[in-house]
Image (tube, rainbow, N blue to C red):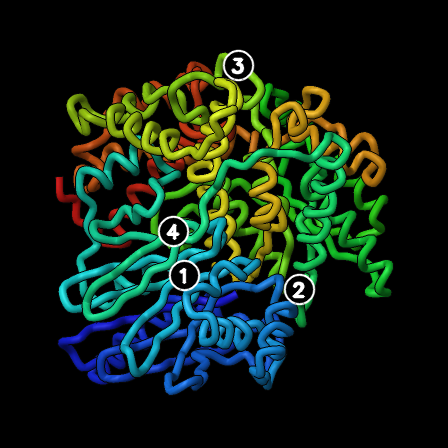
Amino acid sequence: MCGIAGWLDSKIDLYDKRDILTQMSLTLSKRGPDEHGEYIKKNVALLHRRLAVIDIENGKQPMSFSYKNETYTIVYNGELYNAEELRDDLISKGIEFSSHCDTEVLLKCYAYYKKECVNMLNGIYAFAVFEEKSKTLFLCRDRIGVKPLFYYEYDNGLLFASEIKAMLKSKVFTPAVDENGLYEIFFLGPARSPSFGIYKGVKELLPGEYAIYKNGSLFKEQYYKLTAKEHTDSEFETIDKTRFLLQDAIKRQLVSDVPMCFFLSGGLDSSIICKTAADYYKKHDKGQIYTYSVEYRDNKKYFQKSLFQPNADYEYISLMVDNTKSNHTEIILDNEQVANALYDSVKARDLPGYVDIDSSLLLFCKEIKKKNTVALSGECADELFGGYPWYHNKNILFEQCFPWSKSQEIRRKILKDGFLPKGEEYVMQKYYDTINSADKLPSDSPVDSRYREMFLLNFYWFMQCLLERKDRCSMYSSLEVRVPFCDYRLVDYAYNMPWRYKSYQGREKGIIRKAFDNILPYDICWRKKSPYPKTHNPIYMKICSDKVKQILDDKTSPLYPILDKNGIMDIIENPQNISSPWYGQLMKAPQIMAYIIEVEYWLKEYGVVIEC
């Protein structure tokens, strides 16, 4: 994995901006600590920071290739999981190769097929290709949106980067947030609208979107979207194909020239990945796999069962370690450490985020990086295969709202009266924009139709929030994390799978459970879903509450004219009264306090101007 950035401007000489370009590149050094490269011409600059994973000697970027009177130069962040098939195809057409890195494959695939190459790619990626003679820039983001690609368009120019911080260094625009940006922060956050970069003027390519920039104009096209198709496989065939697609995705992602490991929570999703990898390693005499789990100090003492988190993970982790014979490490996080890492989490995202759910992952990845460079993780199975309660409770299923944030009451409670008066209206418009875009079949029943809408809500909102979290928090420690459940073939199959198959035996992710029924231990396979672990220690609430009290009393804080002190103090003093979480099952009173801390730090650290 890597970090990429670029700057095109028809009116200025970018040779004169070398110092600024260097600063832009340095902001991405955590994404790519091993090497850096640049391609600079008068009106175009491409920057690259490399985390070397495959073909360490020959994968340097930017990489150029001349073909049919044109020179193509690429900067690329990601991994192609069908690189060998693409290489064989191009070789059959007379294209020669000098390395086994996927960068060369992608570059030459683009040179040969141009924009049509995007329909051939299986992987996670964000890349830019500049055509020297035609002065054309091609930008592309992977189908599922695993890898980020932001851009800022202005008169005579365009900026793009893996992270917003790189574009900010250009000084082309001021970090500002307008009313819509504030609606995103306070009424949708930590999620954000598809393509919306929060900062005024900053956008992001959608999952499955490419853009062409030429002669000062930007043209965008969606090359991939969830499309409704008739599901013709029988129940048995569906189980078999689900197993095949997932195992194939995992095996394709086991390629690496550097040490690899696996996240293991003891849940269904990570256990499937670890078991498949362990069997693959055994078959190919690659030794034992290395697994990691995360826990918080004293969590066992304070753990409380709930609808969303019915049992703790540690017993199941031990079961899977024994089953896979893995070399396992449990990483224990200190609560004060998790609270202090909230600030680094903001710097990782360039935005307020998923608070301790982010900061804990950031610290977890930091420890893993000491011995490994690549990891596999089980994100996104729940969004694709009905893992959440809102898929199974018909009352929740048909509610006209984002199911993980049903009420805006708790969000309104922290804001002063009259501030952002159209927050609820803004949220509902985003909700309807999403469900109205769902592709359906004429034969879909009202229930089938609603499941497609729910799929899109999860795909473009909840899932993207988790993917952003995984990318930023892992890459902040220079750790590449791959997500096999995001293989687009599996996503397509899941979108069109009838609910009666997906919820086999009435269970969340029932089809996945059945597909691996004779492969995983029974207690793992049919265990009730448990989310990513969070701290249950009351000391974390105290730490965050104390920090928030300081913010509330600071008249110089940018949040002072925005926040309602009485509303926030009521949450601090009566956390048990929160009936609906801020976001999902993990953001309750302690996380609301942490979110306020992150928002204030973001506004100060980034010098954000509020235009409202």
Task: Please name the residue shown 56% across and 31% down the image.
Answer: 537
Q: Looking at the image, is 581 positioned above or below residue 164?
A: above
Side of 243 where 29 appears, left or right: left
State which mark lies toward you, 4 or 3.
4
Does label 1 or label 2 sit earlier along the sequence? 1
Sequence-wise, the earlier of marks 3 and 2 is: 2
Query: Which of disc 1 and disc 4 is earlier in sequence?
Result: 1
Q: Dot 4: what SS? A: strand
Give the mark nearest the N terminus, 1 or 3: 1
Nearer the observer: mark 3 or 2; the answer is: 3
Q: In 3D space, how far apart are the residues under numbered discs 2 and 4 (Cα atoms)?
A: 39 Å
Marks 4 and 3 sit apart, C-alpha to C-alpha, by 32 Å
- Of the residues under marks 4 and 3, which one precedes in the sequence? 4
Relative to 395, say whether 299 is above or below.
Answer: below
Residue ID for mark 3: 394
Task: Return the x and y of residue 582 as percentages of the image width and height.
Answer: 40, 27
- Residue 33, image x, y percentages: 49, 72
Q: Amino acid at mark 4?
A: Gln
Dot 1: few (<14), some (14–19), or many (≥20) neighbours within 10 Å? many
In space, the residues marked 1 and 3 are separated at their CA atoms by: 38 Å
From the image, tell me which residue sits under label 4. 222
Label 3 with label 2: CB-CB less than 8 Å? no
Residue 386: x, y in percent?
A: 59, 29
Is residue 128 depicted above or below 243 in this figure? below
> Of the numbered discs in the image, which one, if any, rests on residue 140?
1
Rounded to the nearest angstrom, the CA distance separating label 4 from label 1 is: 10 Å
Q: Residue 438's quadrant in the figure? A: top left
- Would residue 611 be found to the left or right of residue 411 on screen? left
Foreground tag (1 vs 2): 1
Spatial CA distance of label 3 from label 2 is 46 Å
Amino acid type indicated by mark 2: Lys
